[in-house]
Image (cartoon, coloured by chain):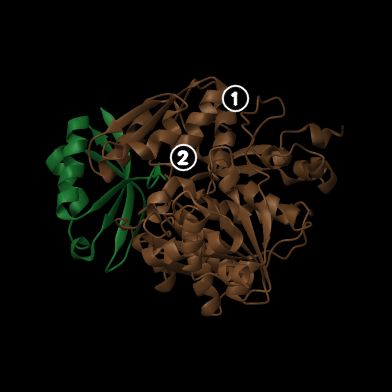
Amino acid sequence: MTKLAAKNHIVGLKCKECARRYPETALHVCEFCFGPLEVEYDYEVICQRASRKAIEAGPRSMWRYKDFLPVQPDDQLVDIGAGLTPLVRSKNLAEALGLDQLYLKNDCVNPTYSFKDRPVSVAATKALEFGFEILSCASTGNLAGAVAAHAARAGVRSFIFVPSNLEAGKILGAAIYDPVLVAVDGNYDQVNRLCSEIADRYHWAFVNINMRPYYAEGSKTLAFEVAEQLGWRAPDHVVVPVASGSMFTKIWKGFQELAKTELLPERLPRMSVAQALGCSPIATAYFNGTFNVKPVIPDTIAKSLAIGNPADGYYDLKIIEESGGAAETATDEEIVDGIKLLAQTEGIFAETAGGVTIACLKKLIASGKVRRDELVVAYITGNGLKTQEAVADQVAPAIQVGPTLTSFEEAFCKLDHPANVAAVA
Amino acid sequence: MARVRVKFTFPPMLIKEPVIHNMSMQHNLVTNIRRANVTKDKGWVVLELEGAQDAIDGAIASVTAMGVRVDPVEGDVIEG
């Protein structure tokens, strides 16, 4: 091993606003300007270690990209099998939308059925390295399940904070892993502020607060995998559902890092944001031609995207500008149509965020912002079984028949379906 | 004494008002502005509030009632 390869690939943390540097600790805000901190790497070291061949020979999970993640070689990975999810070449949906080449990154099939397993796997690993004994988060859904599952795997306790008015069913996917669930009375803003204060006061690993610089890095694997699955090339255009904006910045960072380490050619994708109209502060700023993201009160069926004050909104807008991308919004009705279109053309049942992606992609194509000849990747980040209520009244009821062939055939003949005609013929 | 890091987002009607000064006087708080972007019709300020916990809670409640949006500097931490 060369001296360079033996060096730490993590330089430390760096403020995204004032560029002040900090050591690698559980810190997320610059102590001078209160700007967000980000992990800084030594790309010369990464270049020495990482190669296409080494990655392809790695584990069949997101951890095949370990050299690009903020963990140490001797860290005990908290790995429940997140990542290396299918990149599906779309035929039917591509045809329906009029695209030459459309791929769907299907992150519905992660262990807790959303992309959140990726950042949480990194945050949990880092939490163990720092000696934390409690993993925590504030969540209304996907994140809660991912944190509770990873805590179970790591053998540490987890505290999950939820608004007290949250329906019991929403939290079942987390409760099964036996976390301590804390239901907080108060409105959204009050719960939000309390969680921030608890994170400040208690020595716990809040995955998306004091562990945020590390947590966020896990989402880079969504770019790494797509590039590898496309045969080591970047797409021309990606469409990403956006809530806090963190995943969008990290997908961009992922493609940039592959280019920086010469695993990809320099050409990077155009990056487009998909938001629900009822919670679209970033898209609204884009439409208004400003980088000033005005917070909103969410009102949308896409609960997993309902972040009214997105921490990374400004950075998302910068990436849109730099990459030549765009932003689009989808109404609740369009979201449901998007979910149905994806399910009925490609057999993928996505949660509401997936409906947002497909609906926005359709509109971006119609407006010419996504070109028909581009190689497009749409990110589908969560499983539809989590938000069944969004489409419950949209699916056809069962045909009622008696337990006889005659009864079935009577009902079958009344069906307006091509199979009926074929069978009769 | 407690310290809280917050972001105030001001509606246009409050841009000309000395909201932070009045709040610190009324609630006996020390305020320390770290970053800001204020124009004639919109503005945000990232600052630290230092004082008794009750006074900080009271100050946040009073500026919120005036129409200022108060968020943790991390933005929304409740994720879906």
The quadrant where residue A372 appears: bottom right
Q: Residues within 10 Å of mark 1 (few under 14, many from 20)?
A: some
Q: Residues within 10 Å of mark 2 (few under 14, many from 20)?
A: many
Along the line of sight, the residue nearer the viewer: A76 or B21: A76
Task: Specify the amino acid type for callout 1.
Answer: Glu
Label pair 1/2, CB-CB below 8 angstroms: no
Q: Does residue B52 appear in this view? A: no
User: Alpha carbon of mark 1 to alpha carbon of mark 2: how far?
Assistant: 21 Å
The quadrant where residue A123 appears: top right
Residue at left 77%, top 57%? A264
Which SS class for mark 2? Answer: helix
Provide residue A119's location: percent of width, then percent of height: 56, 40
Give the chain of mark 1.
A
Mark 1, mark 2: which one is toward the viewer? 2
**Left or right position of B49 against A266:** left
Display colour for chain B: green
Provide residue A407's location: percent of width, then percent of height: 47, 57
**Left or right position of A262 against A31:** right
Which SS class for mark 1? Answer: helix
Task: Specify the amino acid type for callout 2.
Answer: Leu
Display colour for chain A: brown
Q: Earlier in the sequence, mark 1 or mark 2?
A: 1
Residue A129: mark: 1
Q: Is residue B52 above or below residue A216?
A: above
Q: Does residue A165 appear in this view? A: yes
Residue A143: mark: 2
Residue B38: mark: none
